[in-house]
Amino acid sequence: MGWRLKDKAKVIEIGEKFIIAPEDVKTDRIKITLAEGKSFGTGVHETTVSCIEVMETLDLKDKSVLDVGIGSGILSIAAMKLKAKRAVGFDIEKFAIDECKKNAKLNNVDIDCFVADSPAAVDEKFDLVIANIFDDIILSMKDEILRVLKKDGHLLLSGVLIEENFKVKRAFEESGLRVLKNIFLEEYTTILLKREEK
Ligand SMILES: C[S@@+](CC[C@H](N)C(=O)[O-])C[C@H]1O[C@@H](n2cnc3c(N)ncnc32)[C@H](O)[C@@H]1O
């Protein structure tokens, strides 16, 4: 991903509002600038793009967000630029956390990010939990994801293979969440759910 700072011509527009671009690019869109690095989350992968497209349709003003498998920090940065009040995220990779901190600084946002392998490491509840991570990992974390999701909170899942979509969707529906969006991409799917307490 060496082009990120070197090739000024390379910019990626995402959804209606966002653009991934180097620092000196002038734009009316909400800009995310990413430092050079090797972590996942450059804005080119269909799952990242799809998460941002869904996030920009949500009202995140003053909301808290947990980013499971934060990678470069791109989704947490997007959340903060959509006026979330707090973004917390973790990743199993130390290099991802280092890059995430660098990217948070570059974009003038605060992200509380650390190395961990499960939401079990987190002790608060969130308005939005995002997990763009393989479906088997999502399912293995299901109970912990639900534990950190507020009543009426949203859950945004991606990285779910097309053939695993039904299984993942059904697992969360059986836990009382309602599917708001189910988006089929080329290889993966993105699912937006809402926890609705009766
Ligand atoms: C598909 S990438 C998503 C990165 C970024 N959130 C995005 O949407 O572009 C998945 C990330 O999850 C991390 N990961 C994999 N297993 C994990 C686990 N058990 N706990 C936390 N992070 C994990 C990987 O290191 C990788 O950075």
Image: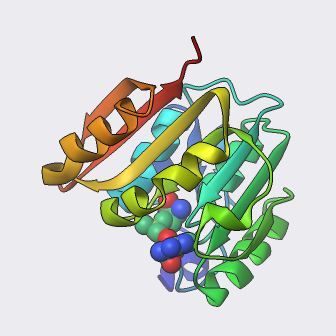
Q: Based on the displayed image, in which of its 4 quarters is residue 126 positioned?
A: top right
Horizontal and vertical percent for residue 31? 67, 50
Outermost residue, top direction? 198
Q: From what the image shows, is residue 69 above or below residue 78?
A: below
- Quadrant containing the C terminus is top right
Question: Is residue 183 toward the left or the right of residue 88 in the image?
Answer: left
Q: From what the image shows, is residue 144 above or below residue 106?
A: above
Q: Nearer the viewer, residue 37 or 79?
A: 79
Can residue 1 be seen here? The reply is yes
Question: Is residue 197 toward the left or the right of residue 109 in the image?
Answer: left
Horizontal and vertical percent for residue 116? 66, 76
Horizontal and vertical percent for residue 141? 48, 60
Q: Based on the displayed image, in which of its 4 quarters is residue 34 positioned?
A: bottom right
> How is this picture coloured?
rainbow
Q: From what the image shows, is residue 188 above or below residue 39?
A: above
Q: Residue at the location (19% across, 40% down)?
A: 166
Q: Nearer the viewer, residue 11 or 101?
A: 101
Q: Residue at the location (77% across, 33% down)?
A: 63
Q: Residue at the location (18% across, 56% down)?
A: 187
Horizontal and vertical percent for residue 188? 25, 53
Q: How many marks?
A: 0
Q: Residue at the location (61% across, 78% down)?
A: 5
Can residue 9 be seen here? The reply is no
Outermost residue, left direction? 163
Q: Nearer the viewer, residue 47 or 167?
A: 167
Question: Is residue 165 toward the left or the right of residue 91 in the image?
Answer: left
Question: Is residue 60 toward the left or the right of residue 137 in the image?
Answer: right
